[in-house]
Amino acid sequence: MATVGKERETRRRRAATTAALLAAVTAAALAGCTNGGGTPDDGRGSPQERESAAGGPSVLAVKIDNAARARPHTGLDAADVVYAEQVEGGLSRLMAVYATRLPETIGPVRSARESDLELLRQFDRPTLAFSGAQGKLLPLIDKAPLTARTPTNSPDAFFRDSGRPAPHNLYLRPERITPKAPGEAALTTGFRYGSAPAGGTATDRQTVRYPAARFTFTWSDSRDGWLVGLDGTGATTAGGKPVAPATVVVQYVKVRESAFRDFLGNNTPYTETVGSGKAKVLRDGRAWDVDWKRENAEDGTEFTTGDGTPVNFAEGQVWVVYAKAS
């Protein structure tokens, strides 16, 4: 009986210790969910950004075809951010990021690239919708901190448009994989919005060239945005509405060869989005030459003037075009 009593007392003490540890962990977690007295410029982003990073809902990112036969795009105007990158053969592809609203349909949807994994690390467990990827890249996607959605694992979310030629006819119904928009707090891009910085140069047009693709942005007072030209043709939605982001960023980055090639043997360029360099920010019909910095893949990208002052973007859609640094 004495032995039984000792065992009971041991179990009681262990239970008490466990309860105390759980209470301490819970208190620490609750404290971590608060602002903790930090200022909005404490280097860790806004409280909303930290809430998202702590496990809140995250963004939907969709890989979008940008070949001539894939246009006009559907749902592109609803994206909060559109990233443009170079792919095989000097062509371009888009990644549209959705947080504040979801359109009924997005597309055409195309395949993922290795660079996407680094770019998406700035978000907390994003959902990446894409048509597929080459076999050697799939294990890297499986290991990445994201949720992959493809026609294979989410067949009811994708459909083919019989009026368009394959492979430029795959579309996504986003509500079937993301029931509702996660909200602005999920946009942990590091971007800041507000009044324009001082200075700048009056600019009505900016062009970015890839070996086999071209982006042109033309300021429109009536649209209060930059009309997008793709390979010399004005970009519109499937409904005929011009695509006109409020802010355009031309970000000069290192573009190198990757370990992957397409079925024709063309090397897949790898766009490095972690690091630092120069950029040009376009808003309100003006342009600013600025610096960019992204220290770690988990961080957003900071844009500052020469003296270190943060550069605000205009409220509305942002396009980031990655251009090869000279």
Image (cartoon, rainbow, N blue to C red):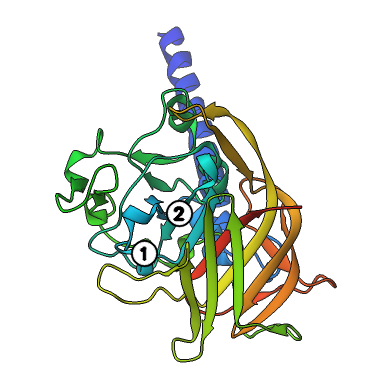
Q: Quadrant of the N terminus?
A: top left
For this orientation, the residue located farthest to the left is 162
Mark 1 neighbour class, 10 Å CA radius: few under 14, some 14 to 19, many 20 or more: many
Q: Quote the CA–CA distance across marks 1 and 2.
A: 10 Å
Q: Is residue 220 above or below residue 65?
A: below
Q: Amino acid at mark 1?
A: Leu
Rendering coords of residue 159 (x, y %): 18, 47
Rendering coords of residue 67 (x, y %): 39, 52
Give the camera-side residue of 42 and 108: 108
> What is the secondary structure assignment of the residue under circle 1?
helix
Q: Which quarter of the figure has residue 290?
A: bottom right
Q: As drawn, is 118 to the left or to the right of 316? A: right
Q: As drawn, is 238 to the left or to the right of 214? A: left
Tell me the residue that label 1 is attached to. Answer: 76
Q: Which is more N-terminal, label 2 or label 1? A: 1
Q: Is residue 14 above or below residue 253?
A: above
The circle drawn on residue 236 is none
For this orientation, the residue located farthest to the bottom is 222
Q: Going 25% across and 33% down the picture, which residue do you hit?
A: 152
Tell me the residue that label 2 is attached to. Answer: 94
Rendering coords of residue 207 (x, y %): 60, 68
